[in-house]
Amino acid sequence: MDKKHIAIIMDGNRRWAEQKKMPSFAGHRAGIDSLKKIVKICPSLNINYLTVYAFSTENWSRQKQEVNFLFDLLSKALINELAELKSQKVKLKFLGDLAELEPDLQFQLKKAEAETDLKDANLNLQVALNYGGRREITEASRKLALDLIENKIKIEEINEKLFENYLYEPNLPELDLLIRTGGEKRISNYLLWQSAYSELIFDDSLWPDFNENCLINCLNEFENRIRRFGK
């Protein structure tokens, strides 16, 4: 079975650091290394699209020092890893309410997207940043309502396919598999629309320990499931 689009909730960085009696920052750094490994192996596993949850709309409630560190880590990762991503033919896309981010970071994200805008990408990597599934659906509804008021669309034209055009990234294929690491069994406001018929796997590995073998095990479990889509 072709595994085209998977999503991952990369959970467990802080708990990993606590177990090792290290500051939480160390867990987030180790999480970047795990993501690099997973990105590298995806094309060989027939994964064309990978969407990862990097920062949620709820994460702003964390301590300011940690939030600042996370965005600084992202900025440095883009600087340090962009050339490697380009060499691997990885196309970057950032999903979420990016307007709330610092202008310098917004510029950096757009620049990274432009530099990796490949027609023959081996992997399409979506990074959900300041993302919330409810906010995505709410914003899509607002945009659709405005188009309706301005007579750009007719009410009888509204259906699921049309609605998807108003999501952050309307061109994503159906989400096949959603993986959450760290042992928690919830999807935490992630890809609520897109995951309607996706398979869910909750892996006990903390994200910095999640490696290629863990991903392969998840994919093997996915292949053994029967997807009925309500039939």
Image (cartoon, rainbow, N blue to C red):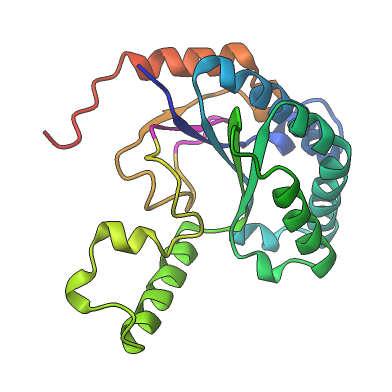
Closest to the observer, 78 or 157: 157
Answer with left or right where residue 203 lies relative to residue 159.
right
Closest to the observer, 22 or 112: 112
Closest to the observer, 41 or 124: 124
- Percent position (x, y) of residue 87? 77, 27
Residue 47 within the segment the image draws in magenta? no
Q: How many marks on residues?
A: 0
Residue depicted at x 82% and y 43%: 78
What is the magenta segment's predominant secondary structure? loop
Answer with left or right where residue 50 lies relative to residue 28.
left
Q: Quadrant of the N terminus?
A: top left
Q: Quadrant of residue 151?
A: bottom left
Magenta stretch, residue numbers: 176-185
**What residue occupies the far front of the structure in this picture?**
119
Residue depicted at x 71% and y 42%: 116
Closest to the observer, 185 or 50: 50
Residue depicted at x 31% and y 13%: 224
Residue 184 within the segment the image draws in magenta? yes
Answer with left or right where residue 50 lies relative to residue 114.
left
Q: Quadrant of residue 65?
A: bottom right
**Up-down relation of residue 140 to residue 201 (above or below):** below
**Up-down relation of residue 128 to residue 107 (above or below):** above
Q: Quadrant of the C terminus?
A: top left
Q: Quadrant of residue 76?
A: top right
- Percent position (x, y) of residue 149? 33, 88
**Up-down relation of residue 183 to residue 125 (above or below):** above
Answer with left or right where residue 224 lies relative to residue 123.
left
- Percent position (x, y) of residue 97? 60, 65
- Percent position (x, y) of residue 215? 55, 18
Residue depicted at x 39% and y 61%: 165
